[in-house]
Amino acid sequence: MTAGLRSAVQAGLLGGLVAWHASLVGMIEAFHNRRLIGDTITLGYIWLAGIVILTAYLAARHKPPRMALLSGGIAGGIIGLSLVLLAFLINTFDLRAILNAATPNLVELITFNLGVTNPLGDFLPIVVGACVGVVAGGLAVLPGTWQRTIATALVVTIMIALLRDIFVALLPDSVGGFFFTSRGMTIPGALFLLIVMGVLVWLVASYGLPGVQPAADAATGTGRLEEPWKIVYLAVAAAFLLTFPLWSGQFLTNVTVFVGLYIIMGLGLSLVIGFAGMLDLGYVAFYAIGAYTMALLTSPEVNPAPWSFWAALPVAMLTAFLAGVMLGMPVLRMRGDYLAIATLGFGEIIRILALSDSLKPFMGGAQGITRIASPQIGNLVLDSPEQIYYLVLIGCVIAWFVAARLKTSRLGRAWMAIREDEDVAQAMGINRVTAKLLAFAIGALLGGMSGAIFASFVGSVVPLSFALLVSINVLALIIVGGMGSLPGVLVGALVLVGLPELLREFSDYRLLVYGAVLVVMMLFRPEGLWPEAVHRRELHKETVPLPETTEPVTTSTSVSTSTSSVKD
Amino acid sequence: MTASRWKWRVDYSQLVVWGIGVLLLILVLIGSVTTLLEGRYTLTQWRDFVIFGLAQGSIYALIALGYTMVYGVLGLINFAHGEVFMGGAFTAFFLADALARNGILDQYPLLSLLAVVALSAAVSTMLALALERIAYRRLRRAPRLVSLITAIGASFFLQYTFRGLYGSGLKSYPSVDVLQGSVFGIQRSVIVVFIGAMAMLALLYLFIQRTKIGRAIRAVSEDIETAALMGVNVNATIASTFAIGGVMAGVAGVLYALIFRQVHFFMGFIPGIKAFTAAVLGGIGNLPGAAVGGLFLGIVESVGPSLFLEGLGIPAAHQLKDVIAFLMLVLVLIFRPTGILGERLSTKRA
């Protein structure tokens, strides 16, 4: 009994610390300006509630029902208490000289606009925290299907409320009026959506999607698609992607173009990190090389006889490929972590060189190069986001095709063998240098392609676009999606590039959240959201028992599969 | 068949790499000789470059110790160490600023500086300990890539946490009157920084060599399992390694602020990478190596742009200071990954 309570108190204190952090970096206040549902529920409150729900859920897990409710309530109440304490501190001492976010607005927000001096304002947060905690504790007691149903429905509803502007633009006024107000969602609209989503998710969770063979073991395998349905799903996806710019509006298309560019880069870097196991932190260098090659060839500012986009694109890709070979050669022999730092150094060198006055006559220095050509087919100039969208889509499909084919090719298997154990791979007759160089260079080629399209889409290149941030972005999306997993790149790009572009409030906290996501992913789910089967098995070797011996193919460990398959 | 046996087994990638290395060496030589022959700078100017380089290098050395000690113990590049350095200096700014406003800084400069250094070191130590406990402890047996990615994530998390807490603007450290002016034509602040850093290095060396904790750290970096069998508390020892690195980084933060007079949430990144370069340069895992590597890097970075680059006729050479440092990092990693003084434990961890 007491041990359970102690763990609940500990969880509450930890959650309180997280809540303090979120408040003091200014997230909560910034998010508070975004009304989501009705007039009172803002993104700030949702964020705090998310902290409480997660903490209480974790505190209540694996406990008997009554204890679970109690633990959840205690954890939630402690988080509420810690926030009141914070409000009290801010109100008493003038912390603002040091802490930017310790504003009176934060105090108002925490005490539900009642103020610290009002006793009700002091108690309400604790009570609300405890109530939310009890609910979350209750959630932990429910069976798994119910948990997933409720969580998914909640997240989807909040996402739709967040993306209000887009849905309002897409939906006819009569429907939009029911769901959305001028700032967020209406309460009946949100409830309706919650219920519909809940029913839908519950149906899918209990009966499965038509044609999807459920995985034998949820922890080690993914579901398989049956043949006729596969075509149906593919056709739906294709129709969706092909018609997307026609109905989605310019803003959404614009965002999608960026997501697409990151998908191409992600696929390229996935070859290097996910397949060959080389952590390349300077991937932005190739993106920059592709973009600058495109700029130097097609901009009349620097080239008296400007090329067309189509002539410059292969050259840009080839340049990136060669740069990949050149940069790859020296770093190949380094061990994993040294390689990461060395590539990071390369990325920074390229950026500083582009920025410096020394190369200004050629690369434009800090001002960069403008007037880069748009792609042109006959007399049609592709310069709107809708038109570039199709170009990027084709690029993504090509990159996907290349990556998917390479993955199961002789070369791909050689990469994976190298990733697992370099010495063994070499002993099996794999040419280490060639294989690694090719991974580096093909990854660079895709990065260069993405950069070239980017340059042409934006119309100018400046060194600022090629900061280390881009490398970290791509790295984060690969990790979140799952290292070496191609669908994972898609998921990662949508979550880490698409979402922040859509959420304006988010921009200041983007890297903060990325950092936290990287750490949390590595600590608790290193295989990513959509992992590759082999990788998942490997990372959970101790926790998840290997599949039964009735499936001889999957029982062999990853090392032996990859090395034995390389020999043929 | 016999002919092919005698053929040299040339690895083409190695050949290219060595070619690039030789080319760079020739360029550096030509650049230096031209600069010296042209006599662009007087002897005093060169001396100033070197002394400034030494001061800057001694700061790199202090930060590098954190990298090198953690690497020695865990085999992990603590990528977030630059942020530990930033966090201390950034927080201590507010104390320095408050002291300066009340006039205490000018009245009791030594005491106030000590207080600022103490606060900075305390904050940095707490950051380092939190990193170890939250981010790294669970991952001790994880693959290298996993812990490196965690470190990168932690680094960004800390940067933007401090940005959120204290704002994104540059904050300028108050000037200390006593440290203004110069002795023998050398800025006083530079001298103080150099001496302070050297004193810290000496203290650390004594600590590692003479105390019980120091001996435990050496034992753990030799072999974790055996040390545990011998009764060393491994968790506590690893934590104390991080703590010592944190103290050094905190002191380095204030010294850095004394020279450059400003702090910023992004200030840890570049010095962090350079300090890592210094650690590798001296041989990672090797304490005196970190000191030597730091000083060497500081001097090269300070003298390099004028000596190597201007002779080659490259305009605005001082902007390429960081390129020299990064290039040196890459070159060391390629040609001598064990560093100048040799890497300890290199055979075991390679």
Image (spheres, coloured by chain):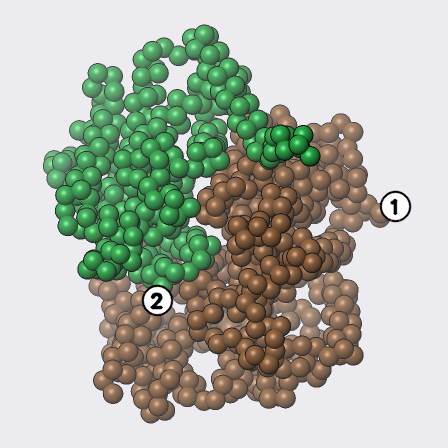
Q: From the viewer's perspective, is residue A108 above or below residue A394?
A: below
A78 left or right of A315? left
Q: Position of residue A183 (x, y in %)?
A: 54, 70
Q: Amino acid at mark 1?
A: Gly
- Residue in the picture at 46% in, 37% down: B333
Left or right: residue A535 compared with residue B67: right
Pointer 1 chain? A
Residue B152 image point, x, y percent: 43, 52
Is A480 located above or below residue A442 in the figure? below
Q: Check disc 1 and report the residue beneath it.
A: A378
Tell me the residue at 60%/64% (across/down). A561
SS at mark 1 in the image: loop
Do pointers 2 and 1 mark residues of a single chain?
yes
User: Looking at the image, which is closer to me, B225 or A443?
Assistant: B225
Q: Residue A175: horizontal and vertical position, in percent?
A: 67, 80
**Which residue, as the protein is rendered here, is positioned at the far front?**
B2
Q: Taking A265 as reference, is A10 left or right?
A: left
In the image, residue B239 sits, relative to residue A217, either above or below, namely above
The quadrant holding residue B112 is top left
Q: Is residue A441 something that shows in the picture?
A: yes
Per the model, the C-alpha gap separating discs 2 and 1 is 57 Å
Q: Please state the horizontal and vertical placement of residue A185, each as a whole percent of the image.
A: 55, 76
CB contact under 8 Å: marks 2 and 1: no
**Element marked by disc 2:** helix
Question: Which amino acid lies under the numbered mark 2 shown in the image of this protein?
Answer: Val
Q: Which residue is nearer to you in this view: B343 or A153?
A: B343
* Circle on res. A18: 2
Q: Is residue A467 visible?
A: no
Q: Nearer the viewer, residue B255 or A193?
A: B255
Quadrant of image for the C terminus of chain A: bottom right
Chain coloured brown: A
